[in-house]
Amino acid sequence: MITYNDAEARYNKTKKPPRSKKYNEFQRPLRRVTESWLMLQKDNHSYAYIINGNEVGRFCEPNDLGEAEVLVRGLYATFDIQQMYKYTGLHSGQTFETTTGDRVQVPYNPFYKGQDEDYSAVLTFDKDGKLIIDKSWHCDVFTYKSSEEDKSKRKALKAQLDAFVTLQMFKLGSLIDNATVNESMGRAFGESELDRGTARDLQNFLAEEVVRTDDPKFMACFNDLAQSAFDMLASKKIHDYPVPPELNKNGWRSRNLFAIHHYGDDQALKDSAGKLMREVMDNIVPDELKKSLVANLLKLAGLSKGSQRVAIPQFPNKLPAKFSY
């Protein structure tokens, strides 16, 4: 992250465009003169970085003790976030060392106005650039925790469908034989290819207090879900399987078994990759299928995460993997 001195030096070395009416006496372009949406502005005892008309970071002049405030406004547009980081070094979730020797992560909530604040965070640093917790704050961000009702609903749903899940575990062999796996599902953030109509029908069934498990349509949808859950599970395992050295011969086309099998030039290598993909699927055990299937059921039922919105404590040592604004 830059400092007040960095902002002042940039301002002083950048001349005001003499013929442009887009900048006043105290504004300077950050890049090209024509890009007035990117500018540095000098105010009383501070410098503000402005992106797309929004002040994203204000760097205040240090006091007599060398303490300086940085006022931050979080963003939600990806391009603006990139520009903010490029010119200020600020990004949500960044780590700072504190005056007490701890390391904390700071989120920048872009919806600060919803909490009646003018900024996402006000951070105070000492002369050594360490964060002073007692003189800093940030807007709340939230995580979801399970209530007793959430836990009860999950338990009840699992009990109702336990026999159906167990049946699918016994059908693991046929799920393997009928599997459709691909790199798209296997990569990070890959999504299930379960038919949307089937997913919607299952959501309607699972929304009922007592699931109509005797309905033939439910059984058909459940079978499709089991196959989809296995396909996702197998795709991720194949995608993440380390490529053996003897198959890694075509650069980016050897990035994983899928790539070798579909894009390779050597038929022998493609056949070997296909055989290894099948071995990966054959090594999937029933308990892994059960875990994947139950997770898909809970997601469709809207029970995969808790319903209680809880604020994360100020300046945590580590932010949770998932949080909301």
Image (cartoon, rainbow, N blue to C red):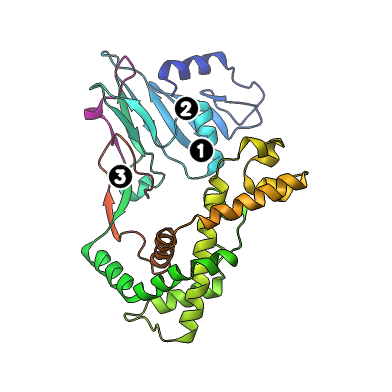
Residue 244: % across, % down: 61, 38
Magenta-drawn segment? 126-141
Residue at disc 1, secondary structure? helix
Q: Work out how far the residue at label 2 is from the one at label 1, CA to CA, in angstroms.
A: 10 Å
Residue 140 is labelled as 3
| Residue type, mark 1 in image | Ile
> Looking at the image, do the residues carrying marks 3 and 1 touch, with CB atoms under 8 Å apart?
no
For the point 48% across and 27% down, the residue is 88
- Whether residue 109 can be seen here: yes
| Residue type, mark 2 in image | Gly
Residue 289: % across, % down: 44, 62
Q: Is residue 305 above or below residue 317?
A: below
The first of marks 2 and 1 along the sequence is 1
Residue at disc 2, secondary structure? loop
In which quadrant will I find the N terminus?
Answer: top left
Q: Is residue 311 above or below residue 65?
A: below
For the point 57% across and 25% down, the residue is 30
Residue 229: % across, % down: 49, 63
Residue of label 1: 81
Residue 113: % across, % down: 36, 47
The first of marks 2 and 3 along the sequence is 2
- Whether residue 190 can be seen here: no
Q: Is residue 91 magenta?
A: no
Residue found farthest to the bottom: 215
- Most foreground residue, 52 or 318: 318
Q: Quadrant of residue 292?
A: bottom left
Residue at disc 3, secondary structure? loop
Left or right position of 148 against 248: left
Q: Work out how far the residue at label 3 is from the one at label 1, CA to CA, in angstroms.
A: 19 Å
For the point 53% across and 75% down, the residue is 198
Residue of label 2: 89
Left or right position of 29 against 262: left
